[in-house]
Amino acid sequence: MTPRALGLWFAHRQKGAGSVERVRLGGLTVSAEGLGCMGMSSVYGAADWDESVATIRRALDLGVTLIDTAAAYGIGHNEVLVGRAIAGRRDEVQLATKFGLDFTTGRGKVVVRNEPDAIKTAADASLLRLGTDHIDLFYLHRVDPAVPFEDSIGALAELVQEGKVRHIGLSEVTGDQLRAAHAIHPIAAVQSEYSLWTRDPETVVAEAARELGVGLVAYSPLGRGFLTGTVDPARLAPDDGRRRLPRFSDEAAAGNQAVADGVRRVAESRGATAGQVAIAWVAAQSGRLGIPVVPIPGTKRVAWVEQNAAALAVRLTAEEIAALDELAAQVVGARY
């Protein structure tokens, strides 16, 4: 690990108000584990507003202060929910949201919108829904190849100058895209799917992130729930988006059970849950990759956020990490 990475990771680890450590993503100090709120509004079937609000507030009580949402989640619903949940506790939160995926065009599919004017309009709309005067971490949700990248990053830089945004993030980008953006304005974090069964960031963006001192925020560290061993793909709700994912098809899920079983075996030997081991593995990759890695497991229930928050207390041994590493070769099915 480079001296710069050591400074970004180890020297900035400290205890927060709750039981969760604090780390640095660029210039932003956050909890070492965050909370993904997408499932409270979309993708994973029905959710309860009151339980979702209680889950966010319980996360804050536990010291999980990086709260992740997006304008696209429930077409604004999720930002409104998050805003209500953190009302009166805004100073405890590092609030992350995303812009640029438009589900409202009526074209039957999502449209990526990264034009400067659209970015500034999106920021104002997010601020209104969230009930805040600034966004701590504002992510470009997906890159639009039709818009010059420098124009998009330039618009974000202007939002920082205006005080509406504190730090800029990118989601699902390559190393070259990260370098291009960072040359225009410092990037605090890249958010990508990263887990025991989705390891693309290791080869796609980690090297550039290490060079630039950019953190990795890992969404779906639980393999969209599969790695917990509590999800039966055959019993998912009809409106659960995982039904469309190849790894959750009947044939693939049967093969992937071996991966979940491997996680379970390590968990049983440690007296932990499978979900905690899966999260602990993601967090443990910080040292190997030379960058801060912050998992943001998503949930919509208090019981699960309590369990997930305890995951960072699980310190995996080198032997356990090696055994878990081998599971990636057994994954059946493409990511999408």
Image (tube, grey):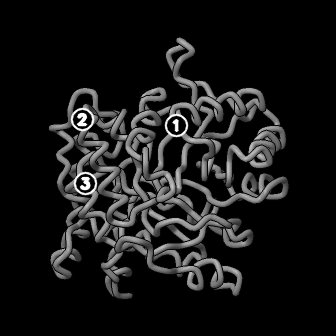
For the residue carrying disc 1, how many other residues have a C-alpha within 10 Å: few (<14), some (14-19), or many (20+)?
Answer: some
Q: Which residue is mark 1?
A: 131
Q: Which mark is residue 48?
A: 2
Q: Is residue 69 above or below residue 286?
A: above
Left-right relation of 107 to 301: right
Q: In the depicted view, which residue is nearer to us: 97 or 325?
A: 97
For the residue carrying disc 3, how many other residues have a C-alpha within 10 Å: few (<14), some (14-19), or many (20+)?
Answer: some
Q: Which residue type carries mark 3? A: Gly
Callout 1 secondary element: loop
Residue 63 image offset from top left, x and y in percent: 38, 66
Q: Which mark is residue 325?
A: none
| Residue 290 picture quarter | bottom right
Residue 292 image offset from top left, x and y in percent: 56, 72
- Residue 146 seen anywhere in this rendered image of the structure: yes
Q: Is residue 53 above or below residue 90?
A: above
Inter-mark Cα distance, 2 to 1 = 21 Å
| Residue 42 picture quarter | top left
Sequence order check, earlier mark of 2 and 3 = 2
